[in-house]
Image: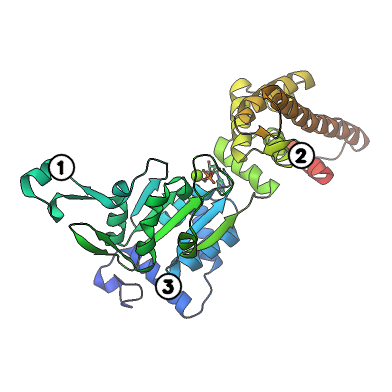
């Protein structure tokens, strides 16, 4: 179906997703804003925390039939957002993960040698690659980590994006359906095994930038990922991960995955909440877990593994000292006001957040 092609799309027995797409396009043509309900539905359906503005922008882009480049550091949620958008429209998604060995043939398609021997070169003997399939099917073509692909492979996308056609030797021209959209992600800060996107390629995308989320949202993500009910543990893990992004001795800080992994490891190590452990046990458990979780994700500006360990230990103990102080502060507060009946987590979170 062409977008906005027929208002009685339902009556034509078209799938609900085309109708949804048509409805969104129609809203945009009329100048009606994408409603916050659409965004809320994506957040709910795919368990996306926050990112309201970015999702709204992405809906504008998709309904305007623009290809989207989602850019951001590792772990900011590029893949999870792109995946949710594609699934929200319930259209077919062809996903590829860029790497330096990804060839043009893999993306466009290739002739099957035994079949060619038997039948010669023809459409029948051509195995369509994911780009060709997505174009013909009017699907989403989701390219994860676009800048990891060799430049030659990236260039195949140019005519597909604006002319909406590609030429395949011995087959001819393949034209895409109008609904064909590319959603690509890239981490511009990553420089090993990546190439810079050409001006021509960048020019054909609209751009959505994902920055790190707020501390509160990061806590929600960690809770969602780990199922942890230990508010203090989640708070500690998130603070540690965030400090690695601010420390002047660190070149590359930890993504949210550092906090998720810290919590997951502590959960395996002790069934207790961290507030129930005595201070030295708590330090031991959290420090070990955080070092395991962060060492592979964090890079120091200068120095060796020992330097990395030293910096991580400094950050971890700094956060744990603050936590310890809030605990003693709380005991004092309780002694002063024994009638105050707040939950443990609420108290520690509110006292602590106020301080930082
Ligand atoms: N806004 C968010 N809501 C829910 N989960 C998120 C969000 N951002 C990141 N995540 C989770 O954090 C992890 C890293 O996200 P991912 O999309 O893989 O990052 P990237 O592709 O940018 O490296 C995943 O487990 C993902 O589910
Ligand atoms: Mg990713």
Q: Is residue 120 visible?
A: yes
As drawn, 280 above or below 146:
above
Quadrant that contains the N terminus:
bottom left
Q: Where is residue 163 drawn, in percent x and y?
A: 35, 69
For the residues labelled 3 and 1, say whether their Cβ atoms are less than 8 Å apart: no
List x then y, in percent, for residue 41: 50, 59
In the rendered image, the quadrant that contains the C terminus is top right
Q: Secondary structure at mark 3?
A: helix
Mark number displayed over residue 278: none
Left or right: where does residue 138 sit relative to residue 38?
Answer: left
Q: Is residue 189 left or right of residue 127?
A: right
User: Which circle, 3 or 1, is nearer the viewer?
Assistant: 1
Using the image, determine if residue 39 lies above or below residue 245: below
Q: Nearer the viewer, residue 272 or 193?
A: 193
Which residue bears the numbered disc 3?
A: 25
Ligand 1 located in image quadrant: top right
Residue nearest the viewer, comparing 238 with 244: 244
**Ligand 1 contact, mark 3 (Cβ < 8 Å):** no
The residue identified by callout 2 is 248
Above or below, 303 against 21 in this view is above
Q: Are marks 2 and 3 in contact (CB under 8 Å)?
A: no
């Amino acid at each position: 179906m062409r977008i906005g092609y027929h208002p009685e799309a339902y009556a034509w027995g078209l799938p609900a997703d085309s109708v949804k797409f048509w409805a969104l396009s129609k809203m945009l043509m009329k100048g009606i804003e994408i409603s916050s309900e659409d965004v809320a539905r994506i957040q709910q359906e795919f368990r996306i925390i926050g990112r309201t503005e970015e999702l709204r922008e992405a809906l504008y882009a998709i309904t305007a039939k623009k290809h989207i480049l989602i850019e951001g550091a590792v772990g900011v949620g590029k893949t999870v957002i792109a995946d949710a958008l594609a699934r929200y429209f319930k259209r077919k998604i062809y996903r590829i993960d860029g790497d330096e060995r990804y060839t043009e043939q893999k993306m466009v398609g290739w002739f099957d040698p035994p079949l060619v021997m038997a039948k010669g070169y023809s459409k029948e003997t051509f195995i369509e690659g994911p780009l060709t399939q997505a174009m013909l099917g009017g699907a989403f073509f989701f390219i994860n980590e676009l800048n990891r692909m060799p430049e030659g492979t990236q260039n195949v996308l140019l005519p597909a994006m604006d002319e909406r056609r590609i030429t395949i030797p011995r087959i001819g021209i393949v034209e895409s359906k109008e609904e064909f959209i590319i959603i690509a992600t890239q981490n511009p800060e990553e420089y090993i095994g990546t190439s810079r996107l050409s001006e021509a390629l960048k020019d054909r995308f609209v751009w959505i930038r994902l920055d790190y989320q707020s501390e509160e949202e990061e806590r929600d993500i960690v809770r969602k990922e780990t199922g942890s009910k230990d508010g203090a543990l989640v708070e500690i893990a998130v603070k540690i991960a965030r400090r690695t992004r601010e420390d002047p001795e660190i070149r590359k800080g930890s993504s949210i995955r550092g906090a998720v992994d810290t919590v997951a490891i502590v959960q395996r190590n002790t069934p207790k909440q961290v507030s129930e452990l005595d201070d030295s046990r708590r330090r031991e458990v959290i420090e070990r877990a955080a070092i395991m979780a962060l060492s592979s994700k964090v890079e120091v500006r200068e120095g060796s593994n020992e330097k990395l360990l030293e910096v991580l230990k400094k950050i971890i103990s700094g956060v744990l000292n603050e936590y310890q102080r809030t605990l003693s502060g709380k005991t004092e507060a309780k002694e002063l006001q024994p009638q105050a009946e707040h939950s443990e987590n609420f108290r520690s979170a509110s006292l602590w957040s106020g301080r930082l």
